[in-house]
Amino acid sequence: MASASTALATPDVDAGIARRRTLDLVFQAVALLVLLAVLAALAALVYSILHDGLGRLSWDFLTSYTSRHASHAGIRPALAGSIFIIVLTAGIALPVGVAAAIYLEEYGTRSRMARLIELNIANLAAVPSIIYGLLGLGLFVRVLGFGGSILAGASTLALLVLPVVILSTREALRTVPMSLREGSYALGATKWQTIWYQVLPVALPGILTGLILALSRAIGETAPLITIGALTYVPFLPDSVWSPFTVLPIQIFNWVSRPQVEFAQNAAAAIIVLLALLLTMNATAIWLRDRFQKRRIS
């Protein structure tokens, strides 16, 4: 009787397996089609930008100041402002975010307050950027008196990327094996010495990855900077953190909003420069991550 029931059940089992395999193949095909569609749209967008902007891209375009005449307009103040903003944003967000992640992961307890803080940090990562712009306007521009300066813009963007830095740093710290900490404690090291000399070097590749992802978002933001008073026309280079400024996304927005075709070509060329800057940042982060990983292995 057992063999008969097994023989009867086998066709049903085989049919179920075949059905699941068919569904799996269908899902893979749909996923592949979606991926190809996204890549095709991205390729078309990049081709359109390159087609419109490569002819305008030149050394004079990179080193000239903005102008009301499209043929004489350049991105020098916007490019300098973007570099100033990103460097200062990283300088503010990295130490604060890493310190907060270390406290929550290494020192914090699993209390109700700690869980509430973790929940709020996760929620802040999804808050629209314009909200951070309003916060920066109220806190940095008006209360602290920074005005529409580079410091106010960088501080606002640092608040914007801080949740991402904290979450990615905590994930990187969790990947460090507990045996490494226990071995350091066994040799007489204190908790802080263990974190500084053992845990952070191992977690550094993950921290750098999270930082570059956060800065990649910050470099393309426009709404928070416009909210705090960033300028659309800057005929000078910023010389300190208190200088007024503009950035590439704002300059691109300004050119795109004009009806002349020449300004649209300028905007496409500026987008190429922005993409090159973004790719350079990502390449630098990948190089640093690989270098620290090789050093850890060796």
Image (tube, rainbow, N blue to C red):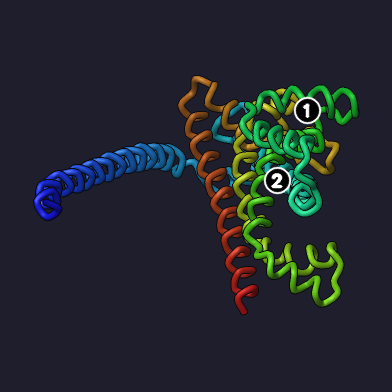
As shown in the figure, which amino acid type bears the numbered disc 2?
A: Ile
Quick one: label 1 or label 2, which is nearer the N terminus? 1
Q: Residues within 10 Å of mark 1 (few under 14, many from 20)?
A: many
- Looking at the image, residue 82 sits to the left or right of residue 5; the answer is right
Q: Residues within 10 Å of mark 2 (few under 14, many from 20)?
A: many
Provide the residue designation for mark 1. Answer: 136
Using the image, determine if residue 222 lies above or below residue 54: above
As shown in the figure, which amino acid type bears the numbered disc 1?
A: Gly
Q: Nearer the viewer, residue 181 or 268?
A: 181
Q: Who's the residue at 80% across and 64% down the image?
A: 196
When asked about the image quadrant of residue 154, the answer is top right
- For residue 288, say whether it is visible: yes
- For residue 235, say whether it is visible: no
When asked about the image quadrant of residue 127, the answer is top right
Single out the mark in the foreground, 1 or 2. 2
Q: Who's the residue at 80% across and 28% down the image?
A: 148
Q: Position of residue 54 (x, y in %)?
A: 45, 44
- Looking at the image, residue 12 sits to the left or right of residue 61; the answer is left
Q: Secondary structure at mark 1?
A: helix
Using the image, determine if residue 101 lies above or below residue 161: below
Name the residue furthest bottom.
Answer: 298
Q: Nearer the viewer, residue 276 or 298?
A: 298
Q: Quadrant of the C terminus?
A: bottom right
Mark count = 2
Provide the residue designation for mark 2. Answer: 166
When asked about the image quadrant of residue 92, the answer is top right
Q: Secondary structure at mark 2?
A: helix
Q: Position of residue 55 (x, y in %)?
A: 44, 43
Q: Who's the residue at 60% across and 44% down the image?
A: 216
Q: Position of residue 240 (x, y in %)?
A: 84, 43
